[in-house]
Amino acid sequence: MAEQSKDRKGNNEGEQQTTKSRRRGDVLENALLSAAWEELRETGYSRLTMEAVASRAKTNKNAVYRRWPSKAELIVAALKKHTPTPSLEAPDTGNLREDVLTLLKRIIKPMQMIGAETIHGLMVEYHGDELHSKMTLPPRSEDILAIAMKNILLNAERRGEVKLEELPDRVITLPVDLIRFEVLTTHTLLTDEAVVEIVDIIFLPLVQKLNKQG
């Protein structure tokens, strides 16, 4: 009888410990996102599995699938949590060229951290209406990158570098639109050198040409 009482007591203590250690809500979600981030960095996007993430987080795969039905959705959530959010306010260095370069480098830095394989994998796994909804841009008046570019050019106009009224909206947003186009069509990373080409070979000569014509 004494031994049975001890066994029951031990089982109860074990059950209490399991209940206390069971993670729920934000605690479990943060553990899963951290596990996904670590798994991504160690194995890469193509080899990452939901089962491996669950194992690393010391839980079962159903806990992962309940929150994120697909690997792509899980990784997007992990990236949002673990990669820095760049400031998209208009830089004001006192020079148009440096302002545009600073903004574009802020945009591509998180992409460089994420890596080409992950970007490619995400682009492949999102498809159809889902991809369209993810990639559809707001109107230029509401697009944070378009607003930043316009503010950069407003600052440049105050310094006497450009005449903003001579520039169509498509020219104003051209640098950020080219970055989006490159990522969408090539699924690869932009280098710092590519950003300099966008600014020095395409954007600034076009702005100067349009200002002279005006």
Image (tube, rainbow, N blue to C red):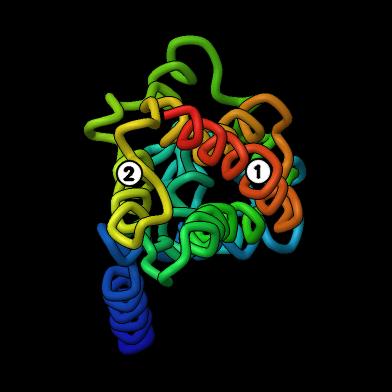
Does residue 167 appear anywhere in the picture?
yes
* Between 3 and 141, the one nearer to me in the picture: 141
Q: Residues within 10 Å of mark 1 (few under 14, many from 20)?
A: some
- Residue type at mark 1 is Ile
Q: Earlier in the sequence, mark 1 or mark 2?
A: 2
Query: Residue 80's quadrant in the figure?
Result: bottom left
Does residue 59 appear anywhere in the picture?
no
Q: Is residue 12 left or right of residue 207?
A: left
Residue matched to label 1? 198
Q: Are marks 1 and 2 in contact (CB under 8 Å)?
A: no
Does 184 appear above or below 147?
Answer: above
Q: Residue at x 62, y 65 (%)?
A: 38
Does 124 appear above or below 2?
Answer: above
Image quarter of the N terminus = bottom left
* Between 27 and 105, the one nearer to me in the picture: 105
Residue 105: image x %, image y %? 57, 59
Residue 78: image x %, image y %? 48, 54
Which numbered circle lies on residue 207? Answer: none
* Between 27 and 79, the one nearer to me in the picture: 79
Q: Residue at x 37, y 27 (%)?
A: 169
Residue 87: image x %, image y %? 37, 63
Does 168 appear above or below 156?
Answer: above
Residue matched to label 2? 150
Residue 125: image x %, image y %? 61, 26
Q: Residues within 10 Å of mark 2 (few under 14, many from 20)?
A: some
Q: Residue at x 28, y 69 (%)?
A: 19
SS at mark 1 in the image: helix
Q: Residue at x 38, y 86 (%)?
A: 3
- Residue type at mark 2 is Lys
SS at mark 2 in the image: helix
Q: Mark 1 to mark 2: distance in Å?
A: 17 Å
Image quarter of the C terminus = top left
